[in-house]
Image (cartoon, rainbow, N blue to C red):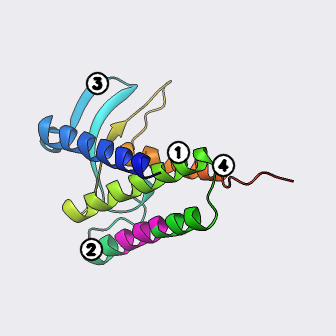
Amino acid sequence: MGWVTLGIFVLDQVTKYLVVHVMGLGNKLAIDVLPPLLNLRMAWNYGVNFGLFAGDAAATRWILISVALGIVLFVLVWMRRDPPGRLGLISAGFLIGGALGNVVDRLVYGAVADFLNMSCCGIDNPYAFNVADIAIFVGAVGLVLFPSGKKAP
């Protein structure tokens, strides 16, 4: 679980650094990669998913950091008390690595750096996300599908 967590965290932070600073998305705001399937669109997310509860107030920022760290702690305790099988541990690593990646964004930037935008089949998706968001989703689904290493009787 630790290596997966570290890998996801590093991948998330490296992609954000490359896109925002090296590629200059922070200033350009948009880079078409494979339109409409994959575009880079700079979006600073001050809230939770899809910008819900957004507000650049310091209180909101610290509440969301606290919630994310609380979830990380909960998953760590869960994994310790009721260790799942390999896929469950990998899923936990995805979720924790992604959550910590978004926490670092809030600490460094004051908001989460979202930049991946995908549209298809005539549907124009206005939302952006990042590697951490993908990891959190994959990890949460994995923990639902692989919650315990114990075999059913």
One can see residue 94 in this view: yes
Marks 1 and 4, how far apart at CA: 12 Å
Secondary element at tag 2: loop
Q: Residue 138 got which mark? A: 1
Up-down: is 95 above or below 57? above
Can you tell which of label 4 and label 2 is closer to the viewer?
Answer: 4
The stretch of residues the image draws in magenta is 63-72
Question: Which residue is identified by label 2?
Answer: 57
Query: What residue lies at 68% left-to-right and 52% top-to-bottom?
Result: 149
Secondary element at tag 1: helix
Q: Nearer the viewer, residue 123 or 111?
A: 111
Residue kind at label 3, given as amino acid type:
Val
One can see residue 128 in this view: no
Can you tell which of label 2 and label 1 is closer to the viewer?
Answer: 1
Marks 2 and 3, how far apart at CA: 33 Å
Q: Earlier in the sequence, mark 3 or mark 4?
A: 3
